[in-house]
Amino acid sequence: MFEQILAHSPALAVAIPLLGAFFTPLVGKINDKLRNIFVILILALDSFVVLLLANDVLSTGSIRTYIFGAKEIGSPVVRIIFEIDGLNAFMIILAAILPLAAVIYSWAFMKDETGQDKYYTLMLLLTAGMLGMMMTGDLFNFFVFLEITSISSAALIAYRTNNKFSVQAAFKYIVISTIGALFVLFAIAILYGQYDALNMAVLANSIQYGLLDKIALVLLVIALAMKAGIAPMHMWLPEAYGRAPSSVTVVIIGTTLGSFYGILRVGFTIFGEQIISASNLGVGIALGWMLVGLAILTIFIGVLMALKQNDFKKMIGFAAVAEIGYMLLAFGAALATIYQNSITGAVDISPAGLTALKGGMFHILNDALDISLLFLVAGAIYYVTKEASLNKLGGLARNMKYTTVFFIIGMIAVSGLPPLNGFASKLMIYQSTYEINPILAIVAILCSILLLATFVKVFYAVFLGPKLPKFDKVKEVPKSMLIGMLIIACIIIFIGLFPNLVVENIVNPAVTALQNATAYMGGI
Amino acid sequence: MITFQIPYLAVVGLIIIGLYAVIFKRNLIKMIIGITLIESGVNLFLITLSFRENSTAPIYTASPGGIMSLPVPQALTLTSIVIGVAVLALMLSLVIHIYRHYGTLDVRKIKEDDN
């Protein structure tokens, strides 16, 4: 039974939410409660399948390939395939946790809104798109899933159409992501025209790194960086994160990191052997430093803009930009350390760079969890007070004990204080960047402190201070919202207490897969 | 020789005009037209890649023989067109909502209204 499920898990992981999405409106015709249970069950089942698959790939270190269509006729190269190695398995863990927590949270959060059938349908479609994006081994298929996520998330950002800012944020988002996706398609067309292949593994195997390939690389990386919210193309991100309903934001964080995964896949797998090679050593190092520069810019912009924000959710949105900067810093610094071994002649990433890679990879997971928790808390505050401006909030800790605790957990985790997960990954980033160039570590630590300052300010403004008479009747949020936050908070605490366990079992296989492009090519 | 380059020049032209419209036009509808122009450019690029001189459509049953154009990019283009329609519909519906809120489609006026 398990074997059967496991064998078809890549297809099932996308098919379950996709089919569930189209059944949701039908179930919704019967009863609202039944529909909510149905959606939660669908996502729980999907998470189970995804975790089963991730566990298998991460523990055995193998690559699981799933071919759509007949296996016998010809080579599998012309068909759409899903190829899951350590990196994909690492990413889909996020896609298993975030939507489930978001949907449980939505039960109470969305209770009074109209059009919930559409909301849940789009949520499931978004999950399907995100999972497809993180698992596919075919570039064109990647583009299709990218568009599925951008269409459904734009519709979800504009969910509260009576708010002019949400509609505006959704429009910005759809314009940016459509242009990004079209450039991805253009780059795919260039690569297809050259190598007659869409399969990532085949492309990685045959890439020549000529002028046209370089153009395709630049187009792919820039378009995906635009979707991942890397400065100077981050403007849409705080808007979209801040104006969407909190539960939606949590899933959109997953898709943003899906785009970030796309950059890693393009940079390290498809072009990996060319960038990290003896003949292009200088180019690779220059590229690494360029990424580091962008990362520092992203961190600075994120942190400084977060300091001056007055809107609770927009402020967390800018903090999210800064966190993406930390990941990029780690990957860029790792790429900047490539060197040629004088004895074997092999080109490799230095040990410090390897730690940076691990730290960056680990930070992807931690950032998604921390920022999600903070957004859920901000959503809870909005739910009870209908107020988003920090100036008008205050004294809520008295009435909302649990939410306050969750905020403290999120705050400590996101600003990288021990003993929570943010500390574990940020320490790895500080440590490795210090060895590479101390200035990077100093900037990173300084910005973390500023981030903490921002969140302490928010903590004081929202939860402490004198009791405001207008919030006298405020009560703790309903149970489903607390459960949604609790799931994420528990995972944060678990990772914070046992970082070694997570690094060894989840992060290391992902980093090994990231470095080993040859294994990915051999996977088909 | 130059005749073979014309479609590629058209691709570049379409994409540049589209980008110009998206970046410099103040009207939201014109921005959307710009995006559809970029999309047409990319689609034309895909189709051009698959075309060979004197080739027939890749339909095997009624083939007169000779070379056929490559079917894969055509399939990709169809998918891309369908996605494009969905995006276009969504963007236009968002523009309708923006117009309802602000009473204008001019980006500058929308910004003024916000402040």
Image (cartoon, coloured by chain):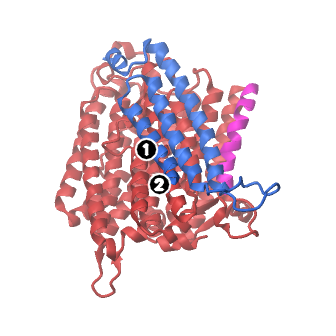
Q: Are marks 1 and 2 in contact (CB under 8 Å)?
A: yes
Looking at the rendered structure, the kind of residue marked 1 is Lys
Residue of label 2: A262
Viewport quadrant of the N terminus of chain A: bottom right
Q: Which mark is residue A227?
A: 1
- Up the image or down, A132 lies above or below B13; here it is below
Q: Which chain is blue?
A: B
Question: Rounded to the nearest whole Å, what is the CA distance between mark 1 and mark 2?
Answer: 10 Å
| Relative to A31, A254 lies left or right | left
Q: Where does the image place residue B89, in percent across and percent down from the top left?
A: 58, 28
Q: Quadrant of residue A119?
A: top right
Viewer-proximal residue, A53 or B5? B5
The residues colored magenta run A11-30
- Up the image or down, A510 lies above or below A465; here it is below
| Relative to A192, A508 lies left or right | left
Q: Where does the image place residue A108, in percent across and percent down from the top left?
A: 56, 28
The chain under label 1 reads: A
Nearest to N terminus: mark 1 or mark 2: 1
